[in-house]
Image: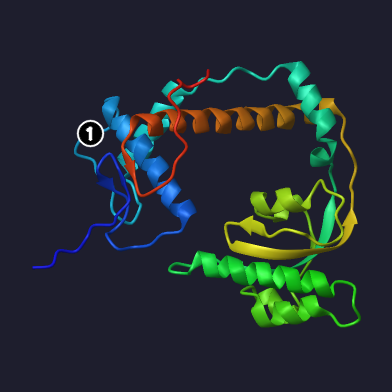
């Protein structure tokens, strides 16, 4: 009698998906990190031991609240000093300009449920190489590629998004566009919650720089966020080092969370 082999990735024996399902590496790592935190919340007595995740990656509302309490308890961050804030502002003045605008067009390769992410990336990278090779030629290869390939309605207009401000963009998209001097087709794919983008910056209006005093609240918040992300990564490395993880690659550390 033949028995199917269970190929599900697991954290401490808990499957992260149905057996035989194939998930993009990023999604698999995200599920593993969430499961590490869910189990840690149970071990800390913040979540009922009977709580269990679904194989679709969803967690219960109770688990979400328990993880939030766990992180509040485990991650303690020092307040950024004025000196650190001033250094950050001096090194990143372009991030705090007001009125900055970019004229952009793009080709979107949308990440949708069930899509082969590896094949999608290959198509996006091929398109990026093609439009960069044709950049500056008489024929508008970018517009043609957008019309043929883009999953965005803007493809019908050659990928034109018009003039954008940072506030009008998803944050991860804005980080790639604003505070830079690049003009032309960006030499890299831009990742966003919508998928992979081939992006061309047609023009820039740099906006006005703001003095430290007028943006120190935003600077302080940015440094807090950076510190939180670093501390969370370290905490997850600690949990991974203490766990039995199968079928997914996570960074692991035997050292305690750096406070």
Determine the residue located farthest toward the front in the rendered image: 1
Give the residue pinned by disc 1: 48
- Quarter assignment of residue 90: top right
Quarter of the picture holding the N terminus: bottom left
Residue 207 in the image: x percent, y percent?
89, 47
Q: Secondary structure at mark 1?
A: loop
Residue 186 in the image: x percent, y percent?
78, 60
Residue under the point 84% across and 80% down: 140
Residue under the point 42% across and 28% down: 238
- Quarter assignment of residue 220: top right
- Residue 83 versus residue 187 in the image, above or below: above
- Residue 39 versus residue 186 in the image, above or below: above
Front-most of residues 172 and 130? 130
Residue 219 in the image: x percent, y percent?
73, 30
Q: Is residue 40 left or right of residue 198?
A: left
Q: Is residue 86 left or right of residue 39?
A: right
In the rendered image, is residue 108 in sight?
no
Residue 142 in the image: x percent, y percent?
78, 75
- Residue 79 versus residue 12 in the image, above or below: above
Residue under the point 48% across and 69% down: 116
């Amino acid at each position: 009698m033949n028995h199917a082999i269970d190929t599900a990735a697991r954290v401490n024996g808990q499957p992260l998906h149905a057996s035989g399902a194939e998930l993009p590496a990023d999604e698999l790592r995200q599920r593993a990190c969430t499961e590490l935190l869910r189990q840690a919340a149970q071990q800390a007595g913040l979540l009922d031991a009977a709580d269990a995740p679904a194989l679709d990656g969803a967690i219960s509302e109770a688990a979400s609240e328990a993880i939030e309490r766990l992180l509040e308890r485990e991650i303690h961050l020092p307040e950024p000093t004025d000196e650190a804030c001033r250094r950050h502002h001096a090194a990143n003045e372009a991030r705090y300009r007001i009125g900055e605008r970019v004229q952009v067009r793009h080709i979107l390769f949308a990440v949708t449920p069930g899509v082969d992410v590896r094949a999608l990336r290959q198509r996006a990278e091929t398109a990026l190489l093609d439009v960069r090779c044709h950049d500056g030629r008489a024929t508008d290869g970018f517009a043609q590629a957008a019309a043929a390939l883009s999953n965005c309605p803007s493809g019908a207009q050659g990928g034109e998004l018009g003039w954008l401000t940072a506030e009008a963009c998803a944050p991860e998209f804005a980080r790639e566009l604003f505070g830079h001097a690049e003009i032309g087709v960006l030499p890299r794919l831009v990742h966003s919650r919508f998928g992979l983008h081939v992006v061309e910056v047609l023009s820039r209006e740099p906006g006005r720089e703001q003095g430290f005093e007028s943006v120190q609240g935003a600077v302080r918040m940015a440094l807090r966020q950076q510190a939180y992300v670093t501390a969370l990564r370290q905490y997850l490395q600690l949990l991974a080092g203490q766990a039995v993880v199968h079928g997914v690659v996570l960074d692991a550390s035997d050292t305690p969370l750096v406070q």
